[in-house]
Amino acid sequence: MKKKILLTLFSLNVTFCAYSQQATSEIQMQSPSNPGKYQQNPSETYWSGTIEGLNKPGQEDPGVAVQVQQTLSIIKPDAVKKNHVGEIIARFEKSGLRIAAIKMTKLTKEQAGTFYQVHKDRPFYPALVEFMTSDPVVIMVLEGKQAVTKNREIMGATDPAKASPGTLRADFAESVTRNAVHGSDSPETAKEEINFFFKANEIFK
């Protein structure tokens, strides 16, 4: 009798361990190679990642820290001249980005040439400098969660003909060269561009 009980308990233990191992293998940290899975964060009391089908689009997972960034935005001469400044700023703010610094100025050829130095060997460089110094621009520091990516999504593709409907360039840009807005393309570039136009005491938290 005791032997049967022991065998039964052993069998149940093996079954439980096998189930636990299977469940554990399915509970993994969310990663590009394993999206939508979970793993308990050993240093925290919450779960990190998302469960497929549980979180709705646009919902943030409380277990995932979202980085607050700053990025540079320039409303270019074409959009300023057509009085689109207010609407462009409103779209940034409605999307959750905050204006941390703002100024209107007319760039000198030296400023524009240095700012777009990366394009110096490109055939469009002279025309770009000429355009950016033709009329005033509005320069801003935008702040928010994933600000660099969000700003570029709001702007749309460089070519307004290829920009998604509802983006700034789809609505306000004239062409590839006169495309209404500029935005930093990475967090590293954003730091350099912000420092180019703003001093630390001109940026407000």
Image (cartoon, rainbow, N blue to C red):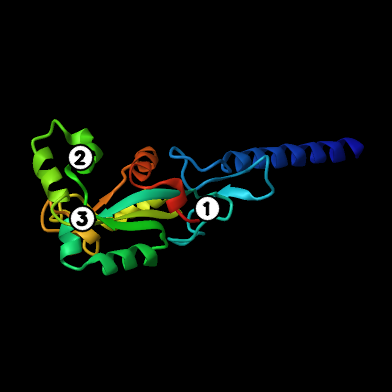
User: Can the viewer see residue 156?
Assistant: yes
For disc 2, the marked residue is 110
Instruction: Tell me which amino acid carries mark 3.
Output: Lys
For disc 1, the marked residue is 51
Query: Where residue 76 is drawn, which disc sits there?
Result: 3
Query: Closer to the observer: label 1 or label 2?
Result: 2
Instruction: Tell me which amino acid carries mark 2.
Output: Glu
* Front-lying residue, 36 or 175: 175
Who's the residue at 27% across and 69% down the image? Answer: 87
Q: Earlier in the sequence, mark 1 or mark 2?
A: 1
Callouts 2 and 3 close, C-beta under 8 Å = no
Query: Closer to the observer: label 3 or label 1?
Result: 3
Q: Earlier in the sequence, mark 3 or mark 1?
A: 1
Q: How far apart are labels 2 and 3 at the CA level?
A: 17 Å
Q: How far apart are labels 3 and 1 at the CA level?
A: 42 Å
Who's the residue at 31% across and 43% down the image? Answer: 185
* Front-lying residue, 89 or 167: 89
Residue 144 in which image quadrant:
bottom left
In the displayed structure, 166 sits above or below 183; it is below
Residue at the extreme right? 2
Q: Earlier in the sequence, mark 2 or mark 3?
A: 3
